Image (tube, rainbow, N blue to C red):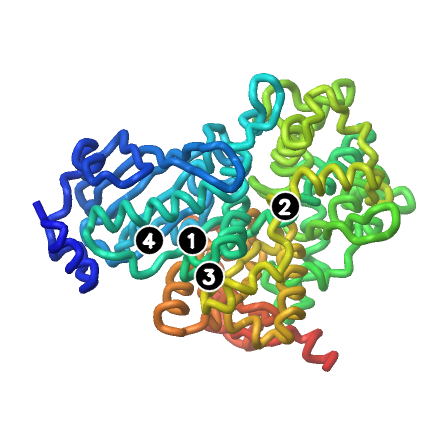
Amino acid sequence: MKSTATVAALLLAGFVSTAVAKPDCTVDALNALHVAGVQVTQASATAATDAVPAHCAVQGSMETNGDGAPPGSARFALQLPDAWQQRFFLMGVGGNAGTLTPSVNAVDRVSALGKGYAVIVQDSGHVGNGTDAGWLRTPDGKRDRAKMVDFLYRAAHDVTVTGKKFAQAYYAAPVRHAYFDGCSTGGRMAMMEAERYPADFDGIIAGDPAMDYHSTLLRFSVQKAALSSAAAYLSPDTLRMVDKIVTARCDPIDGATDGLVQDPAACPVKASDLICRAGASTDCLTAEQALVLQAYTSPLHDRHGHFLYPGWAITNLSGPRGASYWNTGDTAPKLAQAEAPWGSDPNDAPRGWTFARQALSFWMGMGPEQSMLGLDVDPRTNTVGDTLVAVVDKTFGPAETKNPVKLMPFIQQGRKLIMYHGTSDPAIPAARSVLFYNDLATGLHGMAKTQASVRLFLVPGMQHCSGGIGPDHFDTLSAIEAWVEQGKAPEAIPASTRSDSASPHSLPLCPYPRQARYSGSGALTDAANWACAVPQQQAQSK
């Protein structure tokens, strides 16, 4: 047993954990650390394999408190490596949370434990399946304020503070560096941590962040268009046809015909361009299908013309996790049952439909009887009525992280943020991250000052957090680590397709606004033949 004086001396000296004996990896031994607010329920010593180092795998719960809400509790899963490097790594979760399944860059997730990080994930203060939002309401229909506040921001922060204390008690050594990594809702959690608790992490990685819930309004518009007519259905085959046309027209714009559209915003193809003309019936869209694609790719405004939210990209719509999965359905909807067009099994419906219904029923409190098709949304003009906008703003305002001004304390403290976003994300448009980044650059009076603390990497062809036809395998954890600990800002992040890809490809991911540019010789699929440069269309306009 170590004396209190010995532990204090080790903490001050900064000795790593291998200098002293750690507690046994058992429930009793870990609870005997007496870290306030922690209850360990499972613990097991895990031997090293080719995939993971030796570590103590822990599960339990941590108390959440404060922020004007009743006390709550968050479940956690924690991996404590035998060879700890005094680093702490919190992973975000996706959707409506409630699980211990991380939503995080896959490369980072696999590598963190091997790098000697104490790795932790928490459920955001409730039990759920990641999609359902019924946990938000008490049995009498009122909002469960403890669970809501935990989901919005409190659980991630409290688990960070308590998790660091637990790791330090276990190793009898201080946490020297802390990092957060999350994608989708995990990306929103990352941005919220940076804005609300700037001292929690030295470096943060925010992927495809759900920072603005006007996305819910855009989903309403797309679904209303999709359910307007049987002729409106965009099948997976139809989406593949659209991809073929769009790629043929827009792939060469970036100077290399390699199957990837580097910048969908530079692609001039509009939904109306694809409508069948003069008796054509193949390789084109019906007017009703074009309306759906128009709603999908067009910016959303209120009835006064004020911008609300950007549209999705028209590129790379197809694929297992493309627009069918998220928005239009792998099977045609049954219009006769408009409020459950894919039946009673939520797994059969597009995820965008399911999240929209959950938002209506539980977040906005309108209940399952609220007709989505009766909402004040016009997909022909992609406009939304004032009352509906106000309800969404009041409901989701505390969850949003779209105001760059709130990042200033994080930046002023010298901390670092890497954002990344798939350019063909069918869940959260990459254009939203671009708008945020440009607003941040305006506030910081220039791109150079912005890039000193925050860098955005757009991932060509990637869909939501992963997938799609582009290189989606990249290491942001090493990049943020080098930036924080060595002062080496990431000038490019190597990216490749997965090892089982039918079309292997590699590229450097470039800090926005730069893009990967082909050198003019060598294989187009080899990153060695590409370099980061200002896009040609921007360079020519100067």
Upstream in sequence: badge 3 or badge 2: 2
Describe the element under mark 2 as helix, strand or loop: loop
Task: Report which residue position mark 2 lands on.
Answer: 426
Task: Report which residue position mark 3 lands on.
Answer: 495
Describe the element under mark 4 as helix, strand or loop: strand
Q: Are marks 1 and 4 in contact (CB under 8 Å)?
A: no
Disc 4 from disc 3: Cα separation: 25 Å
Q: Residue 202 location in percent, x, y? A: 41, 61
Check disc 1: other Cα within 10 Å, few if <14, some if 14-19, many if 20+.
many
For the residue marked with disc 3, what is the amino acid?
A: Ala
In the figure, is residue 317 to the left or right of 44?
A: right
Task: Report which residue position mark 1 lands on.
Answer: 180
For the residue marked with disc 4, what is the amino acid?
A: Phe
Check residue 88 in the rendering and tell me which mark sits there, or answer none: 4
- Farthest residue in the right direction? 278
Upstream in sequence: badge 2 or badge 1: 1
Looking at the image, is mark 3 or mark 2 nearer the viewer?
2
Looking at the image, is mark 4 or mark 3 nearer the viewer?
4
Query: From where the camera sits, is residue 259 visible?
Result: yes
Disc 1 from disc 4: Cα separation: 8 Å
